[in-house]
Image (cartoon, coloured by chain):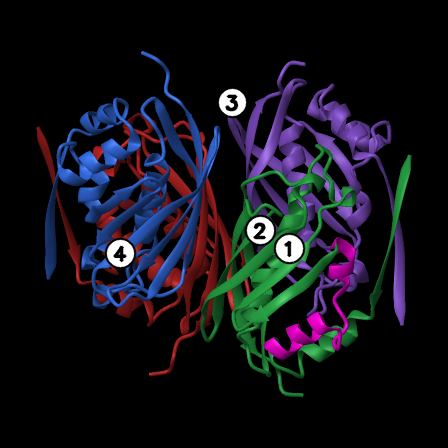
Chain colours: A green, B purple, C blue, D red
Amino acid sequence: MIRERTIAWSDPKLTADASRGMSGLAFLRGMRDGSVPGAPIAALVGLSIDAVEEGRVVMRLTPAEYHYNPIGTMHGGILATLLDSVMGCAVHARLPEGRAYTSLEIKVNYVRAVTVASGELSAEGNAVHVGRRSAVAEGKVLDAKGRLCAAASTTCLVFDLPVE
Amino acid sequence: MIRERTIAWSDPKLTADASRGMSGLAFLRGMRDGSVPGAPIAALVGLSIDAVEEGRVVMRLTPAEYHYNPIGTMHGGILATLLDSVMGCAVHARLPEGRAYTSLEIKVNYVRAVTVASGELSAEGNAVHVGRRSAVAEGKVLDAKGRLCAAASTTCLVFDLPVE
Amino acid sequence: MIRERTIAWSDPKLTADASRGMSGLAFLRGMRDGSVPGAPIAALVGLSIDAVEEGRVVMRLTPAEYHYNPIGTMHGGILATLLDSVMGCAVHARLPEGRAYTSLEIKVNYVRAVTVASGELSAEGNAVHVGRRSAVAEGKVLDAKGRLCAAASTTCLVFDLPVE
Amino acid sequence: MIRERTIAWSDPKLTADASRGMSGLAFLRGMRDGSVPGAPIAALVGLSIDAVEEGRVVMRLTPAEYHYNPIGTMHGGILATLLDSVMGCAVHARLPEGRAYTSLEIKVNYVRAVTVASGELSAEGNAVHVGRRSAVAEGKVLDAKGRLCAAASTTCLVFDLPVE
């Protein structure tokens, strides 16, 4: 039996352009509240922004069959996507207008297999250092029972946006 | 303007069950050739298996707008998904029937931003060590011009499947 | 002007043999208290064990000129040595007699350059998951003013010691 | 029975000052040939520079008892020190005078336990990307029989030295 799912998204240029005209905090809260169009990746994998504070972001994602790998569990890349999102956004949520970031690397430790039985996942990212040229953030994913599923760290480059 | 995309996949239980009844090499070649149903993740992110040899797997993925993050490039999690796939499968392609693996961790270095202008990506995973209890693999993603976009490493646990 | 330093250590076989006859907690506390001979690495780099609890270990190290790299700061490998020690020992401190571990990988984020002006470093390792076959731990290094210098994670293999 | 070892090193300020007045390639070859004083870390852990080319550095280290951890093998931090050195220096060997680097993170996969029976280790670092603001390098350690002991990757920040 074949399963189907249709996703819809907005022009990502609108989102990216908005990111350049406001602080990270305002931008991320705009996406959460719907005043800024969400990124396509959020529609693709089914993630939503829950909380946004300076240096801290929480997102949610409900495991589904369409996340599965060949060996019958949620693909690790979905957890990496979730963690990359909360950690990168946690750094972004520390940057004023005119500053931007890009991820240089990410490392994820997979602690517990995730399936549809895990229930809604909650992912939290925290910026542990935001310097002039680089930043470091950490992240964790918990299942619906609060058990640790994955832990991660990331290094970001931070820089001034070119003046237009 | 809203964009839409519909994906379709098969029951992942069929794929996972097949994985337990054959060698990794036969299983992965079966998925590539269509005799084994592909995993849902492949449909979700748009990846396809190209080459499968003992300890080496190549996959392809064409960057699309639905992969985009809030800052206007392919989300790093998609590259992580692609790399986790080729590296995990490279280890799997060294395992005989009755043996299985699970990823313990993955680390990805992002070297070059990927957009729809990058053209079709090619990802290669190589098992550099497959021991009795653990394995290590490395992976790289190149764009259509052969430029390095990301490099990664992974640690897997390898173990005997329980006899049923 | 040439500087010199003489280090002294005991036969590491004595330490390793002791590790196989007691729980991780008893072994590590024995090294801290001097009833078990310390490992040569501790003498080499100048680290000492401060606190040992189930799944948590704290060590100290005072930066010195002999730790310096070619560009005039403490070599990152010394921080990696310190973090590998507190994280591996944090896992060990959760293992009963008859169980052992080995590190599969370590990742370190360097947040702040360390010099002799940093004062005594304090490193803490915490086991975030100890399973039947693998374990994950995290670690941090702070300088004498409590500022984060480095953060790390590790994956360990855990297994039964062969019965002799 | 107590073992002893005495190490000697030069003022690290001389080495660091030299690094700022020449290209990375000239600096590293100077350390190899003895015209630039070696870093203290090289004396501490016993590493020597073997080959230096643009973006590629090879070092050697002979495992000794003083490298041992509490469980009777070479401490992973020594392998991390060796890998951090060859990878950082491989990046440095691509930088002209007036440019500098610092390591942001390192990840090491431990593949094979190292002991004094491993014989002389050979470590090679290769810069896989050197950009305007960041760089990525990879490294491997082989034992005397050419067997892989450890594999690693690093991210570096690269920047202009302040004009004095």
**Main secondary structure along the magenta-highlighted residues:** helix
Between residue B23 and residue C146, name the one nearer to us: C146
Q: Nearer the viewer, residue D10 or D50?
A: D10
| Residue at far top of view | C164
Contact? badges 2 and 1 (CB < 8 Å): yes
* Cα separation between marks 4 and 1: 32 Å
Q: Are marks 1 and 3 in contact (CB under 8 Å)?
A: no
Observer-side mark, 3 or 2, equals: 2
Which residue carries the number 3 mark?
B132
Decide whether residue D137 is among the magenta residues. no
Q: Tell which residue pokes out farthest to the left in this image.
A: D1
Mark seen at residue C122: 4
Residue at 80% x, 32% y: name it.
B31
Q: Chain of mark 1?
A: A
* Region in magenta: A25-45
Q: Which residue is mark 2?
A: A141
